[in-house]
Amino acid sequence: MGATDEQQANAPAIRLVLSDVDGTLVTRAKELTPRAIEAVRRLREAGIMFALTSSRPPRGLAMFVEPLSLSTPLGAFNGGAMVDPDLSVIEERAIPGELVGAAIALLESSSLSVWVYRGEEWLVRDLHGPRVEHESHTVQFAPTLVESFEGMRDGVAKIVGVSDDHDAVARAREAAAERFGERLSATSSQPCYLDITHPDANKGSVVRYLAAHCDIPTEAIATIGDAGNDVAMFAAAGLSIAMGNAAPEVRAAARRVTTSNEEEGFAEAIERLLLGR
């Protein structure tokens, strides 16, 4: 749950903004707009730090480092990997090796295509599978083709189930929660994806990591997001802002709501809710 009005009124001033990427920072076309870049610049002028977290792999965040002049650690894989802006790894939370095969089997039995992220690799068994081309465009690198995932155990940061059948993805998420409980995290960054990560790899953990790293209270962090996997960071931060394109339950979990990512909702949130312009 978000902070009460009384808690919000007594909270320290915001000193860091943590933003999701897809559906939040960028448009549906995956574009970072000039107004968004300018909003981040204005944050820095106001003495407020800016950080990113995403279900993307670290390499999928590299494109934002220069235009946003990022200096804080990046939370990739929903917090499964914390990396510096040069993508050097600070810490990783890999999926327990004994659960990798079982998680892949569950996704396959749910008729989902499976992707595996290990180290810098994005591994697939079908280069023409659902949304592979779309994802390649989004993260700006291509996957590696493998014949099988059999025997993979160590160093797997994220396993993704993919399907354009959103009901199948939702059923798989429920099955994963029932099968693995608190041993794994199973969340959706978009209705077509089911992300399976280490149980401590969630965006709430990114809030807590940045609070410790920057020596600020979590109440001095504002978060902006649009998806179910952003709710954990909403709950951990002092101020939470949902995008207008977020699902109703995500908007309900946030303290404030901005416009959609097609209406410059990210920049609008920075300008109106954080800088008062």
Image (cartoon, grey):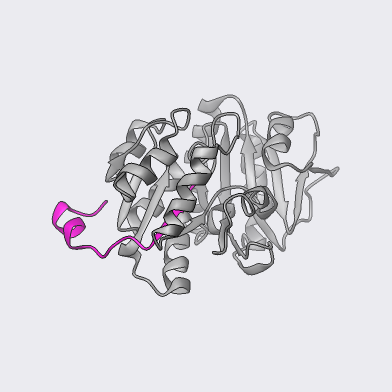
Marks counted in the figure total 0
Residue at (60% x, 35% y) in the render: 31
Residue 239, image x, y percentages: 31, 53
Whole-percent x, y for residue 250 in the image: 36, 39
Residue 187 visible in the displayed image:
no
Left or right of 256? Residue 107 is right
Residue 45 position (above or below residue 122):
below
Residue located at (28% from left, 42% from top): 256
Give the x, y percent position of residue 182. Answer: 46, 57
Q: Nearer the viewer, residue 233 or 39?
A: 39
- Foreground of the two, 188 or 38: 38
In the depicted structure, whether residue 243 falls above or below residue 180 = above
Question: Image height check: is 171 above or below 228?
Answer: above
- Furthest toward the left, the residue is 6
Q: Nearer the viewer, residue 94 or 222?
A: 222
Q: For the magenta stretch, what is the residue range? A: 1-20
User: Is 122 drawn above or below residue 112 in the view shown?
Assistant: below
Magenta-colored stretch includes residue 16: yes
**Residue 32 drawn at (x, y percent):** 57, 39
**Residue 240 lies in the magenta stretch:** no
Q: Nearer the viewer, residue 90 or 72?
A: 72
Q: Residue at x 60, y 25 (%)?
A: 164
Q: Quadrant of the C terminus?
A: top left
Examine the rendering and report whether any part of residue 250 can be seen: yes
Image quadrant where residue 242 sits: top left
